[in-house]
Image (spheres, coloured by chain):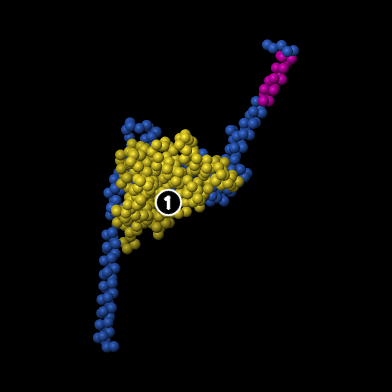
Chain colours: A yellow, B blue
Amino acid sequence: MTQYACTDTTKDVIVYKLDETILPATLFSIRSSSASPAEQYAACRCLEATAILLGYGNDDFIERMEEPLQKVIKSTGRAIQVRLAALRALSLSYFICGTDIMEVYHCMNFCELVCQPKFRGEYVNELLRANAIECWSLLATVIEDSELVGGSNVGGGGSGGTYVVDEDEGEVIKNTSNNEDMGRGVQMLPLLQKCLEESNSMELKTACGEAVALIHEARLDLGLSNNDDLNVTQRKFQRGLFPLR
Amino acid sequence: MSLSENFKEVCFRSGRFLLTCLILVGCSHLFILLPQTGSWEGSDVEVIIDELKQLVSELALTSGHHMSKKAKKEQRATFREIQSTLVDDEPPCDCINIGGTTLEVDSWKELIQLNFIRHCLQSGFQAQCMTNETLWKIFGLDGTEIMANLGMSGGGLSQFEKRMTMGKTSEAAKAADQNLVKKRKNRTKAKNSFLTADGDEY
């Protein structure tokens, strides 16, 4: 798909075939319990590539695949490779096709739940956790720096609160009891630190390290929002300087 | 208004001005004491950030025999880059060539997006980067420049199309090879035809 859909004609074929072939076939494979893990994995990868080919402004596409993909990710009985492929497909679809930032937050909440040591009462595989953190980082690139690293005793609010899942409904609900003013990235730091300290998985450590670098970069950029044209040296020595100082 | 009343008025206004100045200076000192936006100094997570810096620095110098040489090398390279951002505030630096245009990646935002999309597209990454308008917008690529470069280098054919038509493994090359093999067989057969001309076989 990604190699052949390079011209306007072939891309039109993808759009034309989306409703009658691509979505029904992939969603059938994903929903079907009799499909082999390889087939389910291929279906998720196909949806992931389709998101890139469709481009921005395709909320309908996300709407149709969100629910079956979330079910796959939540199903602890499914193969890890299938679950992580489903999570990557969902996140990339929000990143490329989505137009509603609230939906992006919703998907980030979901990634935050999956990257915890325990999800839905079971320990989460470290490879899946690594991919959840990668997906979270991807979605974090589209939100405002103040939402990501604001708060923590510094002016500018975060998105507010941590998120927990309602086990009965399987729905993400907001826990507003603490950290109201902290940005999402700031709230993630203790978890990332724990993974870097304790995990033996190279993938998880790398994903956490990259997320930390992204959060740190956003924090630096927060102090440079009015000085975008500064070079690295200026950025290093002028970061965070208060105008009155 | 008498001179003494004027003097009183001047004194009153001067006093008010001085009071305003004092309030402003006090506020500026208060702002300096607050944690600064743009750095972690004075924030609640300053300790965590310091510990993370130490952890990342240790991972950038990993040694020992608990992992393979290749894995150690990869881990050190990855964490050196993270360390330079976290400790020295230096952005990452990566350059990739897309259809004759160089894409410079100098932030973690772009690097994370690039790695994710590259993982998704695999071998189709180059072909999509050269033709997909969504990817042009994401990475700030100049589509007209890429198309112009492709036009100059390949006479209108993209790199992918050139590989498919002119490469060693293309259908055209395979057909030409099969044709040559067929001709060689016919030639050999014709050369040896006198041996079997009378129907005897040796």
Question: Which is more toward the observer, A3 or B50?
Answer: A3
Q: Nearer the viewer, residue B83 or A51?
A: A51
User: Does the image show residue B103?
Assistant: no
Q: Position of residue A155 (x, y in %)?
A: 33, 59
Residue at the far right: name it: B198
Within 10 Å of disc 1 (Cα), the crowding (few <14, some 14-19, many 20+) is many
Helix, strand or loop at label 1? It is helix
Q: Quadrant of residue A73?
A: top left
Q: Position of residue B153 (x, y in %)?
A: 59, 44
Magenta stretch, main secondary structure class: helix
Residue A58 lies left or right of residue A151; in this view the side is right
Furthest-front residue in this view: A168
Type of the residue with mark 1: Val
Image quadrant where residue A144 sits: bottom left
In screen coordinates, is B7 left or right of A131?
left
Find out whether residue B185 is within the magenta segment: yes
Residue farthest toward the bottom in the current orientation of the protein: B2
A245 magenta-colored = no
Quadrant where the image shows the C terminus of chain A:
bottom left
The residue shown at (26%, 79%) is B12
Q: Which residues are magenta?
A: B182-197
The residue drawn where x is 30% and y is 41% is: A197
Looking at the image, which residue is at 27% across and 88% down? B2
Q: Which residue is mark 1?
A: A104
Let me know if residue A69 appears in the view. Answer: yes
